[in-house]
Amino acid sequence: MNAKLPIAVLAVTLLAGFGFSACATESEVEPVAEEPAVERTEAVAETGEPAGAHTSAEWQIWAYSTAAPSFIGETATILDGDNNVLREGTNGWTCLAANPRGMSDPENGWNDALEA
């Protein structure tokens, strides 16, 4: 029992020392600034996302074709939710919305996960 006492004292001393060394005074702490919305806009612009509404043909073509690898999406046929051709393709591939049916209840979302 007496042999364990020095180990316990050493452990407490080390824990206390590391705990205090990790503390900082309020003047040493730099405030965390939120990223401005401009940076997010620039990031979206870098992806090539059109600025229009998500229901526009331009946005749908961009969204559906960029979901595929670029070598497929660049020349694929693009269909909207009603299977109307938004862009004719040349490579035999077709890009469309993941679930063109939409939600059964637009106000409250999906009834259950299996419906999605």
Image (cartoon, grey):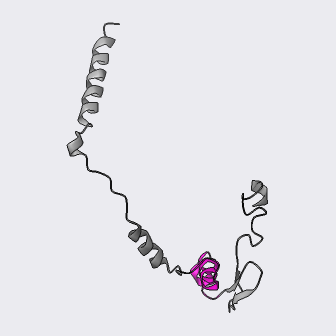
User: Which quadrant holds residue 115?
Assistant: bottom right
In the depicted structure, whether residue 64 falls above or below residue 14: below
Left or right, 8 with respect to 88, comes to left
Left or right, 17 with respect to 46, comes to left
| Residue 24: image location, x then y, percent | 24, 39
Q: Residue at the spot x=75%, y=73% of the render? A: 100
- Name, please, the residue furthest toward the left: 27
| Residue 35: image location, x then y, percent | 37, 62
In the depicted structure, whether residue 63 falls above or below residue 31: below
In the depicted structure, whether residue 116 falls above or below residue 24: below
Q: Residue at the spot x=71%, y=81% of the render? A: 80
| Residue 9: image location, x then y, percent | 28, 17
Query: Which part of the image, by quadrant, shows the C terminus?
Result: bottom right
Q: Residue at the spot x=57%, y=81% of the render? A: 70
Prevailing secondary structure of the magenta residues: helix
| Residue 27: image location, x then y, percent | 20, 44
- Magenta highlight on residue 36: no
User: Which quadrant holds residue 6?
Assistant: top left
- Magenta highlight on residue 67: yes
Left or right, 54 with respect to 42, comes to right
Query: Which part of the image, by quadrant, shows the N terminus?
Result: top left
User: Which quadrant holds residue 17?
Assistant: top left
Q: Residue at the spot x=73%, y=63% of the render? A: 106
Foreground residue among 63 and 106: 106
- Number of numbered discs overlaid on the protein picture: 0
- Name, please, the residue furthest toward the top: 1
Left or right, 63 with respect to 35, comes to right
Which contiguous range is marked in magenta? Answer: 53-75
